[in-house]
Image (cartoon, rainbow, N blue to C red):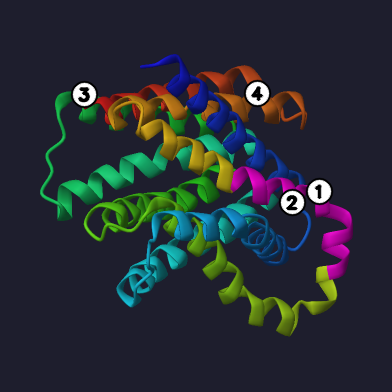
Amino acid sequence: MSPWALALILVAAVAHAGWNLLSKRASQADGLVFVWLAAVASTVLWSPLFAGFLLVTGTAVTWRDLAVIGGSTALHLGYFVLLQRGYGKGDLSVVYPVARGTGPVLASLVAVLFLDERPSPAGVAGIALVGIGVFLMGSGGLRGVGPGLVVGLFIAGYTVWDSQVVSAFAVAPVVLNYLTDTGRALVLTPFVLGTRRRLVAPVWREHRYRVVGAAVLIFLSYLLVLVAFTMAPVSVVAPAREISVLIAVVLGGRLLAEGDLRRRLLAAAVILGGVVAIALS
């Protein structure tokens, strides 16, 4: 792997763990309003990049593209809403690694059942390691493990679906990334402005820096990974970016004073090892 690709992956991992830290710190606010504000902010902040990409490349967004992006929007919407709710119930250092570890395992199972893929011995070992890591994470109490597992379902869903969107349907990743954010904002608008209108201003006043930070880092972390894919094989980039699991556990332990850091680091390391084995299988 080139040094530039490695640098991009590490920055992306920090950015990904960073926006999850911001989301956790805003977890006592109304989750639906926070997710909506972040999506609206992302749509506004990244619109020049999106428009510039369309102009420079001459890319046209077709109705077929919008249809498959709609599927991505639904999966990402469930992911963000449930993740925010999960952070309201559990620690960052539990929910995040369990979710990130469960996602690849379930995505692999979907690929085996529906895409006719067969895991290698390394893949089977990776699945077992993730299971052991999740067990270790839950041995200190199940709070946060359940939400992490549910979020992992949506990670698996959008991982498999998005891979088909950018490959089989040939939708540009920047287009997919931007329009899923925009779609999330549009879908949530009637719910937020209809029943939660009075909460918008208070959540914005208290968490505006976290909203804007999440809007920047969510998009940026994915964009950096996409660029890294052009410089190194997917089989190298994918496992390397999961270093964010360890970063999130450290952030939760140090900045949020979440307890039992040593055991959670051990469990996160086992989960990370399983994800790497799956990615390299």
The answer to whether the residues at label 4 and label 2 have Cβ atoms under 8 Å apart is no
Query: Is 192 rendered above or below residue 153?
Result: below
Check disc 2: other Cα within 10 Å, few if <14, some if 14-19, many if 20+.
many
Which amino acid, by three-letter code, is at mark 4? Val
Query: How far apart, in angstroms, are the residues tagged by discs 1 and 4?
Result: 22 Å
The answer to whether the residues at label 3 and label 1 have Cβ atoms under 8 Å apart is no
Which amino acid, by three-letter code, is at mark 3? Ala
The answer to whether the residues at label 2 and label 1 have Cβ atoms under 8 Å apart is yes
Q: In the structure shown, which secondary structural element does the residue marked by tag 4 occupy?
A: helix
Task: Tell me residue 29's x, y (percent).
Answer: 78, 58
Which amino acid, by three-letter code, is at mark 2? Val
Q: Which mark is residue 250?
A: 4
Q: Which mark is residue 122?
A: 3
Which comes sooner in the sequence, label 1 or label 4? 1
Q: Nearer the viewer, mark 3 or mark 1?
A: 1
Which comes sooner in the sequence, label 3 or label 4? 3
Q: Which mark is residue 212?
A: 2
- Quarter of the picture containing the C terminus is top left
Q: In the structure shown, which secondary structural element does the residue marked by tag 1 occupy?
A: helix
Q: Nearer the viewer, residue 185 or 248?
A: 185
Classify residue 203 as left or right of residue 231: right
Check disc 1: other Cα within 10 Å, few if <14, some if 14-19, many if 20+.
few
Residue at image position (52%, 31%) is 137
The magenta-colored residue range is 201-218
Query: How far apart, in angstroms, are the residues tagged by discs 2 and 1?
Result: 5 Å
Q: Which mark is residue 209?
A: 1
